[in-house]
């Protein structure tokens, strides 16, 4: 049996501090200084942050989507407070634990309470022994012996021992009744990092489709990251506010002279590809600059050169880097998933076929293809998938590599389909999180409690 | 991505058709554009290819085509004006192209759109005014013929747009906001470009126009100049801005630059092989279907002969570099969502890379050893990587233009990553047992990229009684279960307590180390519990 403390009674009347803070923030962001003037501000900030209702950035307190939802709802804590206030009991042991720790409720004095709560008081002992509490009416009178029972005792057998089994002692005794609803101590299984586990699942699916995994390096030359992909050297995404360039080592080497000459000719005037090219003069020095790869397409380009003009299917899931300011939607580094399919009779229909397959894989109900632009593919598209809860979501880009990309790398006869996915968005959807930083969370409690992710 | 903003009413008055919000959204989606609505305001997001759609007039033109209201390349009639621009090809920006548009009706919508288009073209095809910059003037406030020439920045002066007093060009570059913003395009030259008429400076490209030729609501005739360092960009910018204005208002008059007449609105001719089209699309369209799709995309099909077709492409379509671009337009015109998907046959059996296969095995054993997996970032900083670890600084891959100093180098070992993670969890329940499998970047002169990725494993355990023996048990269990033959020898490493650190050897090479983390290192990370850790080079034990 529990009862509300004085503090608890006040909260029941006026609302929990964190709820009142939400009301206060409803009108708009407030500075931390303003919020600090709020009654019980530290409690309010602490719990609303923990519940993910607010964010604090640069001393600015803002209500989150979750907070807005919480504002209109009766939270579990509030419900339990009401239950305790009216009936003295609650069926939610987790919430009771929190309310106890916050001194919002207390246990009733021993004289007023049942034996059950006496046992709960000795929570530490029970938890250590891994024993759940017994029903009051069948408890022995010597309360201190309850949990250390070995062998037959009044009220029946507690812990079953090897001795009882070997000598059949259990046959003459009753087993005490244990209450399976009592909280058990929490343990955490060691497991894969949730996003890593999700990525492993995606890998497995791609392999089942017939893709072979390819690998590359984080640091690439401009040649492979951009030039070989028919990106002009003055393309805005090659600027220092879009890509990371290396200070040390600053320059790398170009591949085989023959290929460099073909890429140069294609960039400048189209070479034999039938293209006009970008015009201007193509610089080897620019192509030698080392950068953190901004897309995994560099891996595909290298693979095309190595594999040559014969059928193949390859994929890559790995880290890419973008010049961005880190917030809930952006990271400087994140994982991308992309693949290529090489073959003589591949067409736009096959590209849509692959994208459709991915949609099925991730549980999307419908697919739409939007014409789009990427420097290295034509035709190009973005794929939108419809999910039961979120509606239409853009899931990735795809296309057929341009002749300007293929010919210099020695692909003469084949068409090459290329597709890429932002895995993060998909993972966040499947994990039910809305902050991309959580994909790489360093919070051990998050990792310990995150459920397995399902594709 | 480029965002173009306009009102629904303006778009519909240009399209000359009533359309619902949904219909507008749909047709723009099929024309590569994502829309966001703010009541009657539409924001369209475009990629950098369709610069002709960087204004509502260009968007309306495409929409009319897609809906079949107008087909093929628009016809532009052009008369000759008497204006001649003589050019001395100024060294900083040698190219110039001009046009006059008469009888314009400068509504608010028109002015807003013109300014937006100018800005977006400067950022796109103009490459931030370097390759091309556009000036728009009230033609009636100019006098006589024009001269585009190099001038002495200390001697030439004029009243820049929005100013009251005359300024020397040098002053404009140093004091005017636009001068400061685009200074880098001119400052290394001794003489700077200017367009002058009988009254003096008309424009100081690419910085600012003169106040004298300011466009106002009374302006009837526009003079447009485009200057730059790239002839194609200059001509294309002029074509786009002129044809987009004509979509709404005015009559075009050409301008002679020396002996060349601008703008050059002659459509470009392309030849397309029908079999190439079907080879890309994957199903057979007949000549009529292909022509229909092309005309909806505002190309004109001239003739078919022997399986080939001749196609006229509008002068504003600067994105057509190859017949593949026309094939895409056919697919877009036909409708991506009308194409039946087909799953391609896989030529081979799929497989994991050796690296990931290896990592999966390691991961499995680590979890069996009761360590929770963590995954961190590649980018870090020297303080975390060396200083806090008490380790000697080593050469690492370093970024030239980091966003913040916190993420300015690539990690070369993993132990700091897991220490940082433990430091973030000092108030969480102990024991804490964690591991990470991740890539580091190692300098490598032999490689084309002067670097290589190196996959490593780190593990750490923190609790009140963590000690060397516990760590050694974990390391040995791991290596044994991976089938790695190993030998352990005493080692000295500054991150660990003296005489409580071991080096792991396999097949004669060092593959990792383990030990009790030095209390000074714990103090650096503000950790208050003993930590034991190990790191193994997974590439070395594969």
Image (cartoon, coloured by chain):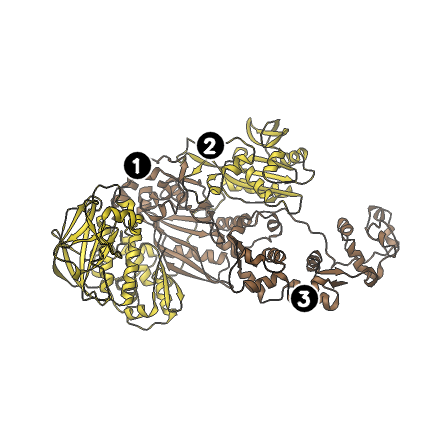
Chain colours: A brown, B yellow
Residue A12's disc number:
3
Foreground label between 1 and 2: 2
* Chain of residue at mark 2: B
Location of mark 2 (residue)? B395
Foreground label between 3 and 2: 3
Q: CA distance from mark 3 to mark 2?
A: 61 Å
Callouts 3 and 1 on one subunit: yes
Left or right: A424 in relation to B312: right
Extreme-bottom residue of the structure: B18
For mark 3, does the 10 Å Cα neighbourhood hold few (<14), some (14 to 19), or many (20 or more) residues? some
* Chain of residue at mark 3: A
- In the foreground, B246 or A225: B246
Q: CA distance from mark 3 to mark 1?
A: 79 Å
The percent coordinates of residue A15 (x first, y second) are 64, 65
Which picture quadrant has residue B397? top left
The percent coordinates of residue A32 (x first, y second) are 55, 55
Left or right: A82 in relation to B139: right
The percent coordinates of residue B193 (x first, y second) are 20, 47
Q: Is residue A305 above or below residue B195?
A: above
> Do tag 3 and tag 2 residues touch (Cβ < 8 Å)?
no
Location of mark 1 (residue)? A258
């Amino acid at each position: 049996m529990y009862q509300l403390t004085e503090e608890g009674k006040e909260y029941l009347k006026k609302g929990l501090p964190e709820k009142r803070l939400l009301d206060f923030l409803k009108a708009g962001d407030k500075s931390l200084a303003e919020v600090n003037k709020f009654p019980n501000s530290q409690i309010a900030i602490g719990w609303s942050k923990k519940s993910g209702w607010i964010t604090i950035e640069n001393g600015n307190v803002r209500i989150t989507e979750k907070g807005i939802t919480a504002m209109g709802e009766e939270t579990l804590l509030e419900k339990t407070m009401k239950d305790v206030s009216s009936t003295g009991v609650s069926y939610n042991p987790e919430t009771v634990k929190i309310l106890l720790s916050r001194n919002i409720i207390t246990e009733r004095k021993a004289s007023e309470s049942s034996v059950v709560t006496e046992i709960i008081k000795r929570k530490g002992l029970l938890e250590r022994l891994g024993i759940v509490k017994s029903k009051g009416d069948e408890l022995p009178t010597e309360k201190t012996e309850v949990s250390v029972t070995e062998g037959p005792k009044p009220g029946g057998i507690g812990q079953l021992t090897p001795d009882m089994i070997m000598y059949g002692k259990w046959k003459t005794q009753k087993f005490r009744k244990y209450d399976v609803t009592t909280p058990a101590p929490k343990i955490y299984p060691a497991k894969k990092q949730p996003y890593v586990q999700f990525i492993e699942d995606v890998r497995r699916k791609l392999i089942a489709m017939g893709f072979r995994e390819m690998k590359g390096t984080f640091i690439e030359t401009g040649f492979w990251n951009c030039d070989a992909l028919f990106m002009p050297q003055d393309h805005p995404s090659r600027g220092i506010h879009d890509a990371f360039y290396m200070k040390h080592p600053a320059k790398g080497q170009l591949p085989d002279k023959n290929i460099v000459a073909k890429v140069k000719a294609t960039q400048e005037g189209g070479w034999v590809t039938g293209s006009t090219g970008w015009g201007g003069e193509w610089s080897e020095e620019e192509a030698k600059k080392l950068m953190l790869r901004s897309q995994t397409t560099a891996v595909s380009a290298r693979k095309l050169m190595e594999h040559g003009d014969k059928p193949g299917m390859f994929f890559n899931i790995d880290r890419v880097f973008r010049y961005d300011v880190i917030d809930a939607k952006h990271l400087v580094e994140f994982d991308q998933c992309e693949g290529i399919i090489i073959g003589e009779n591949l067409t736009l229909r096959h590209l849509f076929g692959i994208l459709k397959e991915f949609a099925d894989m991730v549980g999307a109900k419908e697919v739409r293809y939007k014409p789009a632009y990427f420097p290295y593919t034509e035709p190009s598209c973005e794929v939108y998938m419809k999910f039961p809860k979120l509606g239409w979501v853009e899931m990735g880009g795809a296309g057929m590599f341009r002749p300007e990309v293929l010919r210099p790398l020695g692909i003469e006869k084949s068409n090459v389909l290329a597709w890429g996915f932002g895995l993060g968005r998909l993972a966040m959807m499947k994990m039910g999180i809305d902050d991309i930083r959580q994909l790489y969370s360093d919070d051990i409690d998050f990792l310990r409690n995150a459920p397995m992710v399902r594709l | 991505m480029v965002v173009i903003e306009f009102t629904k009413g303006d778009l519909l008055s240009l399209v000359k058709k009533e359309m619902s919000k949904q219909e507008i959204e749909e047709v723009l989606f099929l024309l590569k554009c994502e829309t966001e609505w703010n009541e009657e305001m539409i924001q369209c997001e475009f990629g950098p290819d369709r610069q002709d759609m960087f204004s509502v007039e260009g968007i309306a033109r495409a929409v009319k085509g897609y809906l079949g209201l107008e087909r093929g390349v628009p016809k532009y009639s052009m008369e000759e004006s008497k204006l001649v621009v003589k050019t001395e090809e100024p060294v900083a920006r040698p190219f110039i192209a001009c046009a006059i548009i008469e009888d314009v009706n400068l509504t608010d919508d028109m002015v807003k759109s013109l300014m937006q288009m100018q800005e977006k073209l400067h950022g796109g095809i103009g490459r931030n005014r370097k390759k091309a910059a556009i000036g728009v003037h009230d033609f009636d406030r100019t006098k006589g013929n024009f001269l585009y020439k190099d001038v002495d920045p200390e001697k030439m002066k004029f009243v820049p747009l929005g100013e009251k007093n005359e300024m020397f060009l040098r002053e404009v570059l140093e004091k005017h906001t636009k001068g400061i913003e685009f200074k880098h395009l001119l400052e290394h030259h001794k003489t700077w470009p200017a367009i002058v008429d009988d009254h003096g400076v008309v424009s100081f490209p690419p910085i600012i126009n003169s106040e004298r030729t300011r466009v106002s609501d009374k302006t009837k005739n526009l003079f447009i100049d485009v200057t730059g360092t790239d002839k194609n960009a200059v001509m294309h910018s002029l074509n786009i801005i002129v044809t987009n204005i004509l979509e709404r208002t005015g009559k075009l008059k050409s301008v002679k630059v020396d002996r060349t007449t601008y703008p050059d609105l002659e459509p470009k001719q392309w030849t397309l092989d029908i079999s190439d089209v079907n080879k890309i699309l994957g199903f057979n369209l007949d000549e009529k279907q292909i022509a229909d799709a092309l005309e909806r995309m505002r190309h004109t099909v001239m003739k078919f002969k022997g399986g080939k077709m001749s196609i006229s492409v509008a002068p504003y379509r600067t994105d057509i570099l190859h017949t593949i671009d026309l094939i895409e337009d056919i697919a877009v015109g036909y409708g991506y969502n009308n194409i039946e998907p087909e799953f391609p046959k896989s030529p081979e059996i799929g497989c994991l890379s050796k690296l990931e296969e290896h990592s999966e095995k390691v991961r499995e054993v680590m979890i069996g050893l009761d360590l929770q997996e963590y995954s961190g970032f590649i980018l870090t900083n020297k303080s975390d990587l060396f200083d806090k670890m008490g380790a000697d600084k080593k050469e690492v891959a370093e970024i030239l233009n980091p966003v913040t100093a916190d993420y300015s180098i690539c990690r070369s070992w993993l132990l700091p990553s897991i220490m940082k993670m433990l430091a973030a969890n000092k108030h969480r329940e102990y024991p804490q047992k964690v591991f990470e499998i991740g890539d580091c970047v190692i300098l490598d002169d032999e490689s084309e990229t002067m670097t290589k990725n190196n996959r490593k494993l780190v593990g750490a355990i923190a609790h009140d009684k963590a000690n060397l023996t516990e760590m050694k048990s974990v390391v040995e269990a791991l290596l044994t279960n991976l089938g790695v033959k190993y030998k352990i020898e005493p080692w000295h490493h500054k991150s660990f307590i003296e005489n409580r650190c071991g080096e792991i050897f396999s097949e004669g090479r060092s593959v990792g180390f383990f030990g009790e983390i030095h209390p000074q290192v714990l103090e650096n990370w503000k950790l208050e519990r003993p930590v034991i850790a190990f790191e193994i080079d997974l590439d070395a034990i594969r």
